[in-house]
Amino acid sequence: MRFGFFGFLIGFAIFAQDGQAQSAVQTADGALLRGLDKVSGDIQDFPLRAGSSFDLGALNVALSECRYPVDNPMGDAFAYITISEDPLQPPVFMGWMVASSPALNPLDHRRYDVWVLRCAMSEASTE
């Protein structure tokens, strides 16, 4: 009896997961990121095109890709970012950052915070 109920719960969870609608996403030309120097309190917004990088103090922030929901381009942004402090060492951060949930996968650095504000689209792609 206990396995029957457990099997029912697993089957229900799988069914519920399959029933969720996936939002269509579009890839943007770049992203707008924000950097915070926790020591000086300076905040800096910097636009990045996909494939480019920006130096924020001792950090190098590189954007690989930014995706946004097709039905709501200004609603959220999902950016794949690589942040390095020393080119000879592994990156201090590599992964997806989500604009609506910056604490979901944050940069853990003693001095700097970096987060995504939104994807940046060219004028032609927004019309």
Image (cartoon, rainbow, N blue to C red):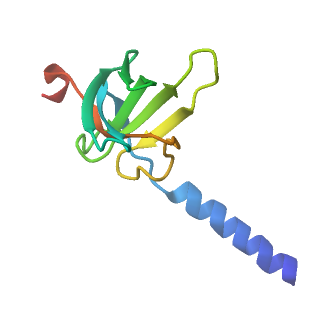
Quadrant location, the N terminus: bottom right
51 vs 6, nearest the viewer:
51
Q: Is residue 16 visible?
A: yes
| Camera-nearest residue between 77 and 17 | 77
Considering depth in this image, is 119 or 53 the residue closer to the camera?
53
Query: What residue occupies the far bottom of the structure in this picture?
Result: 1
Q: Residue at x 40, y 53 (%)?
A: 101
Query: Extreme front residue here?
Result: 40
Q: Position of residue 79 (x, y in %)?
A: 41, 34
Residue 88 x/y as whole percent? 63, 15
Number of numbered discs overlaid on the protein picture: 0
Residue 80 x, y percent position in the rendering? 46, 31
Q: Residue at x 22, y 26 (%)?
A: 121
Q: Quadrant of residue 8?
A: bottom right
Q: Is residue 67 above or below residue 110?
A: above
- Side of 121 relative to 15 (left or right): left
